[in-house]
Amino acid sequence: RDSEFIIGTVYRPPSGDATKFNETMSKILSSFTSKRNVVIMGDFNINMFSNTKHRSSFEESILCNGFTPVISVATHSKPNCQLSCIDNILVNITDNVINSGTIETHISHHRSLFVASILTLEHKPNNIPSKKDSIKYDF
């Protein structure tokens, strides 16, 4: 097993360009196709419950690049609005996933997300990341 794992976060503002976002996300996801143990989580602000071209495009880029969304329940609720699934966790290896879901915290309109996975990491004395990589995209 490969001991490397990558964890990333994404936020797309509700007013962000969904078409540009989907194009960029597809490029990002495709850059990880040869990596194992990749987890990308975030507030994508694309409702997976909706029947729109943006949702279809987003879902296609996720699946075509070998990722699976592990959240399939409502993640966002506001008074007088329909429940939506705009937050998610994407993984490229589902064999290791034990459980995933949401936690109602009443702190915001968003529910907290979690995924529990089994990871086998090789112990090395210097197995601590030496730097953080951060890439900012404007949508």
Image: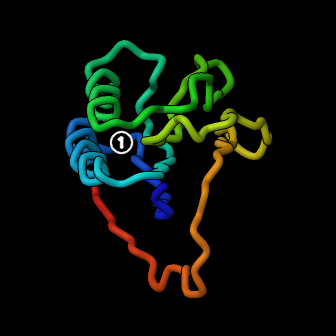
Q: Is residue 63 above or below residue 136?
A: above
Instruction: Residue under label 1, please give it.
Output: 15
**Residue 129: % across, % down:** 50, 79
Please tell me in which quadrant of the rendered image residue 57 appears.
top left
Residue 93 visible, this angle: yes
Q: Secondary structure at mark 1?
A: loop
**Residue 66: % across, % down:** 34, 36
Q: Residue furthest top?
A: 51
Please tell me in which quadrant of the rendered image residue 96 appears.
top right
Amino acid type at circle 1 is: Ser
Residue 8 visible, this angle: no
Q: Is residue 131 above or below residue 38?
A: below
**Residue 108: % across, % down:** 70, 43
**Residue 134: % across, % down:** 38, 71
Asked whether, in this view, residue 78 is left or right of residue 131, the answer is right
Q: What's the residue at 33%, 65% (across, down)?
A: 136
Q: What's the residue at 27%, 31% (across, down)?
A: 64
